[in-house]
Amino acid sequence: MTEPQPRGHFGPFGGQYVAETLMPALEELEAALEAASRDPGFWEEFWGLLRTYVGRPTPLTPAHRLTEALGGARIYLKREDLCHTGAHKINNTLGQVLLARRMGKRRIIAETGAGQHGVATATAAALFGMECAVYMGAEDVRRQAPNVERMRLLGAEVVPVESGSRTLKDAMNEAIRQWVTHVETTFYVIGSVAGPHPYPAMVREFQRVIGEETRAQCLETLGRLPDAIVACLGGGSNAMGMFAPFLEDPVTLVAVEAAGEGVETGRHAAAIGAGRVGVLHGMKSFFLQDGDGQIQEAHSISAGLDYPGVGPEVAWLVESGRVRTVTATDADALEAFHLTARTEGILPALESSHALARAGDLAREIGPDGILVVNLSGRGDKDLATVLAAGKGGAA
Amino acid sequence: MNRLESALRSVRDRGGKALVPFLTAGFPDRQTFVDLLLEAERAGADALEVGIPFSDPSADGPVIQEASARVLAAGYRLEHAFADLRAARDRGLGIPALFMTYYNPVLSRGSERFAREARQAGADGVLVVDLPWEESGEFLPVARDQGLDTVLLVAPTTPEERVGRIVAGASGFVYCVSVTGVTGQKRPVEATVDDLVGRVRRHTDLPALVGFGVSDAASAAALAARSDGVIVGSALIRTVGDHAGASAVARARKFLDSLREALKG
């Protein structure tokens, strides 16, 4: 298990790069998290919600026709798309909102890009009767209108952010500003294994149920561990949640970054593949940036992967060789979306479609006797407009 | 003791209050920026804080965000910030100056190179806003080796024992953040500032300057009365606004004159 070394570092990554005003708030959060972690009642309530509200455990579905179409290892899909609200994000927001309640905070804020984390946060806040404001880049508010409406129906205030590139990174900047300004009353729910310590480790712990279930399901129904697991990689919450329980096992772990229109075009979101080490949003990790350290915009057809950085633990696991990264382009993801729809009757999220896009290569690498698990992190209903606008995938 | 610290100590020793204007490098344009630095000295500024524009200024309010975005959109580079301060020095700028920056431009440049180039440009100190005490070990010693004072922030949320740790690593002055918030947004509560400056004074005799909440002459006077001086950024940038050239300089001068007058008390 890679626990953050002193002061929340994963090797050279992580840390707490925030303005002084927030440091005491991070200490308070760390102390509350430690106390909650030792309290069996906290986890009982959390796991109870995962069972009775989220609908866990989610199935591990054998993908017979996808396996046949791709050739190679038997493919199994971890069905996070069947979680309440349609993606794994809800696991984490319930955990953090429970913690916020324990800390006596009444107001929840969050950043969101595509709106999935915003919806999951608004959902958890509604469930516990807490006030909720979600910061969202003005450009994303325009692109993701249905999720904006969902958040508002759930009682959250959606605040369009007009600064910078008006996308996810700017929403996160604004959420940090709001947190600084109302730090004593407000809990900031970060949606990925990103941000200053203790967020990356905390979010991973709330998401590790994905990997724990997968591990138990493999042992129970297949009698063995998989040979490889593949997950998409934006900030890294679904990847870390899936990988965390397998780090000590002889299982190949593959994370797929979004290559957008192609890494060579400069319009992509491959922070590890094409970024450099930097500091943003409280953490040291890989970021897309220019020669002066100005952060660059990410590009991906999948709004959930449209972030110019990656969580620090993922960075460390890649740097130390434990996790392998590959990329998939927008066109690759669309093709995988259509293939999965037609062969398995599942519309995967465009984020998860990036993981599916590399499943064929991995399945063939492992061979027909092997087992490959794909983390199907969310459902694709939210992406219908994007997919239809892109035309028929497979042709690309 | 470096120039920045000695200048601010001498202001205090003669019973005065320090005035430190903050200007975003390259704002509103390169030429006017250099003129503004020189005019600030003529208006009686004791030191200058020069903000290096960053794409993601999460500690700044809308005024400085906007100024940074405008400068970057015009193609301003880190090397321009160094060159512009150098140009002001070459034209006779005498008062100490410190760079305020986010950490990523430093890291991207390489800590040592950044510190060396800042020093060569004529900077006397540096403040990295998102580098708290816990993470400061990877840059502050490098900056000190290059002869730069290392200014650190303390905030209303900073507990007493933490203030002690922070000021032990600080030089130049202690930057007291007057509000829990970003730059230029909230009005400081006087009792909060008194508490904070009090905590600082119990641990160091470094000058304690107050910033983040100076909006006009009255607030400058009120905050200076409780500290060793003030840093004024957003209000100054807002005064310059859409102006450039001589009109920007004249507006800044009028505003700085009003602050200088208010600080005479």
Image (cartoon, helix red, strand yellow):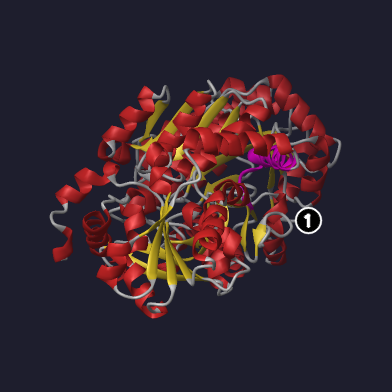
Can I make out residue B232 in this image? Answer: no
- Label the magenta part by its dominant secondary structure: helix
- Dot 1 falls on a residue whose secondary structure is loop
**Residue placed at 47% from the left, 57% from the top?**
B81
Q: Quadrant of the N terminus of chain A?
A: bottom right
Q: Is residue A18 one of those drawn in magenta?
A: yes
User: Percent x, y for residue A271?
Assistant: 43, 63
Q: Is residue B247 one of those drawn in magenta?
A: no
For the residue pair A33 and B128, the one nearer the viewer reads as: A33
How many discs appear? 1
Instruction: Name the image quarter holding residue A371.
Output: bottom left
Mark 1 sits on what residue? B1
View extreme (right): residue: B202
Start-end of magenta stretch:
A16-37
In this rendering, would A376 be left or right of A43? left
Amino acid type at image mark 1: Met
For the residue pair B18 and B207, the one nearer the viewer reads as: B207
Say few, some or many: other residues with alpha carbon within 10 Å of mark 1 (under 14 / 14 to 19 / 20 or more). few
Instruction: Name the image quarter holding residue A186.
Output: top right
Q: In which quarter of the image is the C terminus of chain A?
A: bottom left
In this rendering, would B49 be left or right of A120? right
User: Percent x, y for residue B184?
Assistant: 52, 31
**Residue placed at 56% from the left, 57% from the top?**
A216
Can I make out residue A232 in this image? Answer: yes
User: Percent x, y for residue A379?
Assistant: 33, 46
For the residue pair A274 and B98, the one nearer the viewer reads as: A274
In this rendering, would A169 be left or right of A328? right
Compared with A239, A24 (above or below) is: above
For the residue pair A92 and B26, the one nearer the viewer reads as: A92
Compared with A113, A233 (above or below) is: below
Q: Chain ID for label 1?
A: B
User: Percent x, y for residue B80?
Assistant: 43, 60
